[in-house]
């Protein structure tokens, strides 16, 4: 499948949309909202047998690009939190990769 249209692209798009909503709605709390996003990631991981670490890394790459281009502080906060949460999940999925980075 072409990288631009894989399931990671849909999850990155969802992350971007959620960060926009987080920016606009001061009543949204970071942790429960982030947890909802990560639940969606887990559903995608459980739905198929593919390279889960690669899937999450592709989402991270795209969200980092969006984060770098974002000026709104609240949106930056959510995008950063998503990237950190995804990276933690990658590290859980591949402990040998985490050990290499020490």
Image: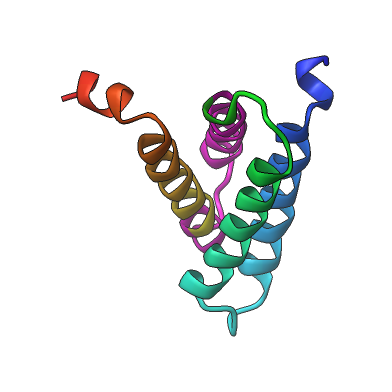
Main SS of the magenta part reads: helix
List x then y, in percent, for residue 67: 54, 41
Q: Residue at x 49, y 71 (%)?
A: 30
- The answer to whether 47 is drawn above or below residue 27 in the figure is above
Q: Residue at x 74, y 55 (%)?
A: 17
Q: Is residue 35 above or below residue 83?
A: below
- Figure quadrant of the C terminus: top left
Q: Is residue 89 left or right of residue 15?
A: left
Q: Is residue 16 above or below residue 75?
A: above
In depth, the one of 20 and 45 nearer the eye is 45
Residue at x-position 84% and y-position 26% = 5
Which residue does the image show at 41% across and 46% down from the upper left?
Answer: 84
Q: Residue furthest bottom?
A: 27
Task: Give how far across and how far down residue 46 sits, in percent.
Answer: 66, 45
Magenta residues? 54-77
* The furthest residue to the left: 102
Q: Nearer the viewer, residue 17 or 5?
A: 5
């Amino acid at each position: 499948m072409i990288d631009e249209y894989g399931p990671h692209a849909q999850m990155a798009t969802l992350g971007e949309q959620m960060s926009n909503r987080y920016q606009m709605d001061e009543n949204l709390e970071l942790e429960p909202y982030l947890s909802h996003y990560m639940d969606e990631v887990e559903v995608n991981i459980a739905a198929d047998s593919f390279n889960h670490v690669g899937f999450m890394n592709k989402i991270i790459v795209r969200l980092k690009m969006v984060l770098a281009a974002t000026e709104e502080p609240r949106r930056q906060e959510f995008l950063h939190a998503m990237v950190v949460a995804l990276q933690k999940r990658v590290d859980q999925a591949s402990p040998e990769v985490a050990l290499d980075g020490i």
